[in-house]
Amino acid sequence: MRIGVITFPGSLDDVDATRAVRLAGAEPVALWHAEHDLKGVDAVVLPGGFSYGDYLRAGAIAARAPLVQDVVDRARQGMPVLGICNGFQVLCESGLLPGALTRNAHLHFRNRDQALRIERADTAWTTSYAAGQRIVVPVKNGEGRYVAADADLDRLEGEGRVAVRYVEGNPNGSSRDIAGVTSADGRVVGLMPHPEHAVEDLTGPSTDGLGFFTSVLEAVVGA
Amino acid sequence: MPRVVVDVVLKPEISDPQGQAVLQALGRLGHDGVRGVRQGKHFVLDVEGTPDAAELRQIAETLLANPVIEDVELHLPEG
């Protein structure tokens, strides 16, 4: 099982994402945003950071990078894709996921351990959890407020597209406490919190984040 | 060289905390008459030859603005 981790100019969490992939038991494969080469990977992680300095809008320029266009094409054929923080912003900007992420309601960068509820335990990235399970992983963002038109939010809720929700406090004013969403087929997931920072007791507030990376092993084997 | 201007602002239904912060600062400075502030982006494009309105609209709507949350206004040169 080979899982690609894309590095953009300004990526910060590609090293942690790579480590999480390895700890989950898969082989991490470094991918470079400017190349049209997915190196035969079975799934892709877009890590956190500040690609292209968040110029224009967070994730906007990265979403037009050559490799991301390849990721979009493969994702539409069912390849699992996980976007974390800046990676989530890239996936929304690419059109793979609905909605948008914009400036936090309180205008502050928020960095803390965050409780989440897994709403969907049947996506490619969440089968290691139980629906309704509470997990704690770090959250750290300045433009993490999930927004969409009310009618679109109603539709997403109706279709069960909210994958992860903030509980015990909303860190950024996200609509309806949405922390992460999934594609209609459950193969693409994006979330603002950082499961890759919660995979070892030594460095994380928990090991709750590892489940995202173990889930995809089943998803690819089962496909 | 013809100059094309593109203005981008958040849609009215999307809250704009930066605009709110500016509005609060104006209140502290005594400018009570300002009742609302929306912050946006202003792009100035220098275009070779006669600007192609359809192409520029596509640029504005697919890259300069995110149509999920932003409205865009395109200003082409006169004539």
Image (tube, grey):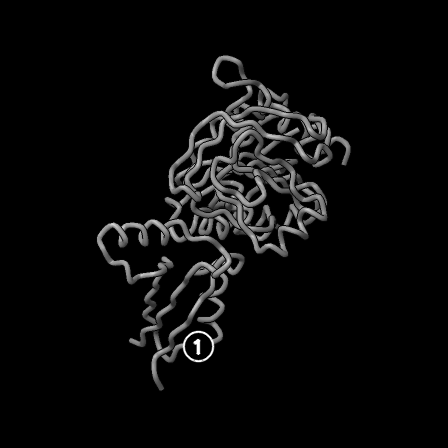
Q: Residue at x 31, y 50 (%)?
A: B24
Report crowding for label 1: few under 14, some 14 to 19, many 20 or more residues within 10 A (C-alpha): few
How far across and how far down the image is residue B71, in percent?
47, 64
Callout 1: residue from which chain?
Answer: B
Please say if A150 is above or below B48: above
Towards the viewer: A59 or A152: A152
The residue identified by callout 1 is B52
- Indicate the amino acid at tag 1: Asp
- Residue B44 is left or right of residue A64, and the answer is left
Please say if B11 is above or below A197: below
- Residue B76 is left or right of residue A214, and the answer is left
How far across and how far down the image is residue A31, in percent?
51, 37
Residue farthest bottom in this picture: B79
In the picture, which quadrant includes the N terminus of chain B?
bottom left
Towards the viewer: B60 or A193: A193
- Residue A83 is left or right of residue A53, and the answer is right
In the picture, which quadrant includes the C terminus of chain B?
bottom left
Q: Which residue is drawn at 52% across and 32% down?
A: A169
